[in-house]
Image: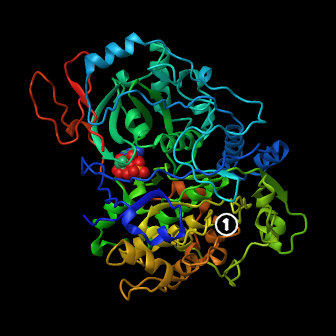
Amino acid sequence: MASRSGTKGSLDKQNKAFGIETLEGISRKPSPLLASKTSKSGTASVAQEVPPKQLNIETTANKKLHNAGQNGLLDSLAGKLDTSLRLGNTKQTQASLSPPATETKGSVEKIADHEKKTSEHGTVKDGVSSAKVSDGASSLAKTSGSAKISDRADFVESGKSSICRGSTSSNVSDESTCSSLSSSINKPHKANDSRWEAIQAVRSKEGVLDLRHFRLLKKLGCGDIGSVYLSELCGTKCYFAMKVMDKASLASRKKLLRAQTEREILQCLDHPFLPTLYTHFETEKFSCLVMEFCPGGDLHTLRQRQPGKHFPEQAVKFYVAEVLLALEYLHMLGIVYRDLKPENVLVREDGHIMLSDFDLSLRCAVSPTLVKSSSLETEPLRKNPVYCVQPACIEPSCIQPSCVVPTTCFTPRIFSSKSKKERKPKNEIGNQVSPLPELIAEPTGARSMSFVGTHEYLAPEIIKGEGHGSAVDWWTFGIFLYELLFGKTPFKGSGNRATLFNVVGQPLRFPESPVVSFSSRDLIRGLLVKEPQHRLAYKRGATEIKQHPFFEGVNWALIRCASPPEIPRPFEIEKIPVPTASTGEKPAPGAMPFQQNSDNYLEFDFF
Ligand SMILES: Nc1ncnc2c1ncn2[C@@H]1O[C@H](COP(=O)(O)OP(=O)(O)OP(=O)(O)O)[C@@H](O)[C@H]1O
């Protein structure tokens, strides 16, 4: 398997931008179901920016935004904006991932021991009780991790707040008591998911949900901050991907903040192409995230299996369109993703995608403001008013033209000169019905100095240490599109150092084969502009990209109902051997026996 290196560290000085020696390589991740052990390493801790000051919630505007939504997705988004702002207004007094005293790397936990500990401390702690909700006037408390302060104070790089978090004082905690963030009520798009009910049933019966209630069947993969296991909620045939993080290891490696960031972001999400976090709980040693399981592996692995190791253009269009919607939603929540690459795009059971891995994400404090156009010039726009939600940054230093509602929001670029009649949508994704209202919430004011990402995907402004914002996601989107189409990234050099130099200094070139459409190359050209301010989507985010001719004919509102290019083979749980101590069966590599009332042990071989 080809290897690709990445970095998850902070860049203190400009000259470190090319000091690749300081960066640790990150190997590419194989498919979760094909490989049992993968590893990633990263030494430097994620830099963290200044916590935001008080966040201003424009409640009326949010309500209007809610009303403006043309479909459920937009409605839900408005609700999510509310949620994220509420989160931002919360003051945290204790970190939920409290570092335990001992190092547990590579530990073997006897299940009996685990259960004993659980019952010793076994009372259900109210997650809320360990976190105080402020009146909204306080800034967010810093927890841990190395800090790097940028000249902007308008965003948070990692999680520092949460209304709902596990108790620090208890050894076992779950979110039973703060279900507003972990139940289907808050996630209308996943409300019909039977897994919620299964989880709720266990909670109602047992009073608490924790590790004892899951069977860990197979190790799906291993990341920098934890390992992910295919797990079954015992006796329910409900399967999940459970990310298990060793708290002592996180603390000793200064990764608590990254873990917290990921959890807090996951708690906010409700989108068809983003993970559902069903629950989160903690044991004495571990912090566990219970998420939706994607049996289709990741797009990197899937690409390797394609003829010529690249996808057909129609398939590319499908995958990047779904990723674009996921990024758009994240940006509307003020989240800059920063780690787009095929390895992080998982394929769900139904062939649609799920963008995973949020521990590198940057959170920007935004105060969305709704602006409704009143003087529209073109006929279609008169019929379909344009709504523009712009982040209104609180810090005076952030007040810049991009934070003020741009006039471009009112006059979206129309790419095609053809009349409506002439334009015949022809691709498999579906037909664009009528133009949708547009929501634009590009966190253009965000600035980070962190040096994070994967070398081949790093944006020039990150490498140059100039400070970066949401435009890095549009750069990585361009690299992603290029890689899916051509089977390789455009700036890869003989080593990491050469790659970084190429990203900054080499012009974009396209291979002669495979032959791809002009519009795909045009879109890539627009995205891979080295100066972020000239990059496509810099001002109006995903809206600009959606209007590009490459996506002509895509029915954005219904893409989740479109037929995916490939549907994974049905996932057969029976084929995963579950060894028992009595039979002495050897576990398949990565298989994690975890059964109640048995001598089986649970082994977490981290990192
Ligand atoms: N929901 C899921 N369904 C199926 N497999 C998953 C799921 N989430 C993660 N995985 C697999 O587990 C592996 C580890 O995921 P994880 O997000 O912990 O690490 P990562 O993507 O390598 O990122 P990081 O190092 O930043 O933590 C992934 O490579 C992926 O193959």
Residue plotted at (58% across, 71% down): 553
Residue at the image position 27 percent from the left and 66 percent from the top:
2
> Which residue is located at x 58 percent, y 61 percent?
449
Q: Position of residue 288 (x, y in %)?
A: 42, 33
According to the image, what is the colour scheme of the structure? rainbow
Residue at 43% x, 13% y is 122
Tell me which corner region of the image, top left, top right, bottom left or bottom right, holds residue 557. bottom right
Residue 43: image x %, image y %?
39, 52
The residue type indicated by label 1 comes to Thr
Residue 430: % across, % down: 55, 65
Question: Is 592 left or right of 295, judged from the image as shown?
Answer: left
The N terminus lies in quadrant: bottom left
Label 1 secondary element:
helix
Please give the residue where the numbered disc 1 appears in the rendered image: 543
Q: Nearer the viewer, residue 603 or 380?
A: 603
Residue, far right: 375
